[in-house]
Image (spheres, rainbow, N blue to C red):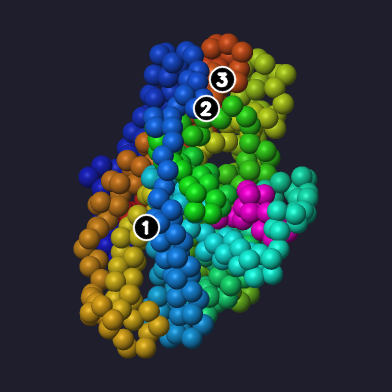
Amino acid sequence: MGARYDLPLPLWLYLLGAAAAVAASFIFLVLFRTSARPTGPRHLIFARGRLSAWLVAALQILSLGLFALIVTAGLIGNQNPFKNIAPVFVWVIWWVGMSFLAAFVVNPWRLVNPAVIAWEWVRLWAAWYWHLDRKRRPMARYPVCLGAWPACVLFLVMAWLELVAPQRDVPRNIALAGLAYLGLTCIGCHLFGPVVWLRNADPFSVAFGILGRFAPLQIAGKGLRWCWQLRPHAVGLLSDKPLPASLAAFTILMLATVSVDGLLETPAWAALVEGVSRAGAVGEGTGDVLATMLLGTAPLVFGGTYLVIIRMMRTASGEAEHPLGALAGQFVLSLVPIAIAYHLAHYLSFLLLAGQFAIPLASDPFGFGWDLFGTTLYRIDIGIVDARFVWLMAVGAIVVGHVLATWLAHETALAVFGTPKAARQSQGPMLVLMVGYTVLSLWILSQPIVEP
């Protein structure tokens, strides 16, 4: 965004006010919330509803059609990223839009994942054509020790491809990445079954699944038989069981990568890259090398900080018998609203502005000069959002996200620790983490928006 916003108040007052709001929510919870909220089915508003098989079939056909269109456009279409639908659809409409949909409405990825749909349809066709009994084929045993670590690795690779990789917007590269994902998912589902593979090794299923815990709707099923449940926002993040270490690490990784994306857009980062480049300490591609190093170290820093806070919480509670790993897995979901808030603050303007490129490209997805729907002359309206809107929305999202995170952490503490007093005492270190990250998040978001 080219325009900058001249704050009516100094930046430090916004940071102080946001931190005070988070601290006030903690004080309110300590004073008035002394028993844990029950988790599980009692949270549901509407327990079960059936999705129409025709609707499911239509969505799956549409998903496969869009996937085929994007891959074909990437392989044979115009390789100018602004004249090919693949880059804007993958990085804007799908990745950003699907994240918002999964977090605020419902996570539909298992239902519309084109790779899984393709594998299931091919499997059904093969079973019919060769008269195979697909129920008799035993699945390979997935190594328990791997957990969701494959998803962590693949998510980090995806983040590097999105944020750092040279020529990441070239349509052919995007198409080849899509085909690689299709092949890997089909192989994994064939060997271990879709449930096991998607739960442990598919980075998008794991990411959208974690975000979907915040959403009010939840859908589940297979084939053409799907049902849905309705619940209040965020209660899906209250869990009776701690997350395994690999899933806890994945949650920290999501928070770290979106923060890295924000840091890469700050003037401070640009100055660092320029200084290192002038010094000649890295050589060619200084920015990419430094960004790769930042992307690799940020999750370690975030994870280490989180573990220190968890250890301090255990000490403050006076209940040293709790295993550190179990506590870390129990409280990590309370950080999800922070990741969602930062995602909203950082990417909403990107979705509203860059997403408009899909309007003319819908008429000419390959860049061949077509005008299928009469929209190729559409011009992007950059006035749909301004710097003032982006800043105020960022402040609101970050504060609300951290307040919700504080509430989730307090509810979890009441359920985990033996007494309300121990729960209250344990939340001091978590409050420091919440307030500190509130200030850091708003500072990062302010750098490309507000006047210095």
Q: Quadrant of residue 203?
A: bottom right
Residue 433 x/y as whole percent: 52, 33
Which quadrant is home to the C terminus? bottom left
Residue 179 in view here: yes
Residue 87 x/y as whole percent: 44, 72
Residue where numbered disc 3 is placed: 415
Q: Tell me the mark number nearer the camera, choosing from 2 and 3.
A: 2
Residue drawn at 34 percent across, 66 percent down: 354
Residue 247 x/y as whole percent: 63, 43
Q: What is the distance, in whole Å, between disc 2 and disc 1 at their CAs?
A: 42 Å
Nearest to N terminus: mark 1 or mark 3: 3
Q: Amino acid at mark 1?
A: Pro
Residue 219 highlighted magenta (yes or no): no
Residue 269 vs residue 397, the one in the foreground: 397
Which quadrant is home to the N terminus? bottom left
Residue where numbered disc 1 is placed: 448
- Residues rendered magenta in the picture: 189-204
Helix, strand or loop at mark 2:
loop
Helix, strand or loop at mark 1:
loop
Q: Residues within 10 Å of mark 3 (few under 14, many from 20)?
A: many
Residue where numbered disc 2 is placed: 40
Are the two marked residues, 2 and 3, in contact with CB atoms closer than 8 angstroms?
no
Nearest to N terminus: mark 2 or mark 1: 2
Are the two marked residues, 1 and 3, in contact with CB atoms closer than 8 angstroms?
no
Residue drawn at 76 percent across, 50 percent down: 142
Residue 189 vs residue 151, the one in the foreground: 189
Position of 33 with respect to 176 (left or right) is left
Residue 200 highlighted magenta (yes or no): yes
Nearest to N terminus: mark 2 or mark 3: 2
Q: Tell me the mark number nearer the camera, choosing from 2 and 1.
A: 2
Q: Amino acid at mark 3?
A: Ala
Q: Amino acid at mark 2?
A: Gly
